[in-house]
Image (cartoon, rainbow, N blue to C red):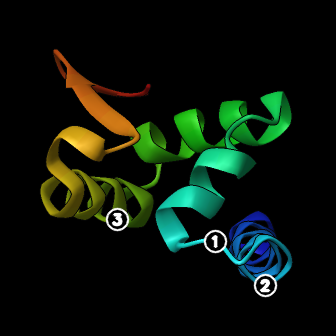
Amino acid sequence: MEDRNRWILHIKELRFRQGASILEAERIALSDPHWRRWVERQINTDERCHKFARSHMKANREAALIYKDGEMLKLR
């Protein structure tokens, strides 16, 4: 839970500093290998994160940062 809160705060901070949309801030955050590994693990092991990832995919379609590969969700 602590890491999830840190992720949310990180995205908020990036949005503020960069004047970025949520999608742009997430793209920036995922350029960091630490966050990328954490998100990849979370979207496949944490049910709540998995649901958020599926919603992200549905809302963003081709622009989504996540895609389904078999049974796994992966980052672009």
Residue tagged 3: 52
**In the orientation shown, which residue stands out farthest toward the top?**
70
- Which percent across, then down, holds residue 8? 68, 76
Q: CB atoms at circles 1 and 3 under 8 Å apart?
A: no
Quadrant position of residue 74:
top left
Distance from Cα at disc 1 to Cα at disc 3: 20 Å
- Which percent across, then down, holds residue 68? 21, 27
**In which quadrant will I find the C terminus?**
top left
Label 2 sits on a secondary structure element that is: helix
Tell me which label, 1 or 3, sits earlier in the chain. 1
Q: In this view, does 75 lie to the left or right of 29?
A: left
Tell me which label, 3 or 2, sits earlier in the chain. 2
Residue tagged 2: 16
Distance from Cα at disc 3 to Cα at disc 2: 22 Å
Residue tagged 1: 20
Label 1 sits on a secondary structure element that is: loop
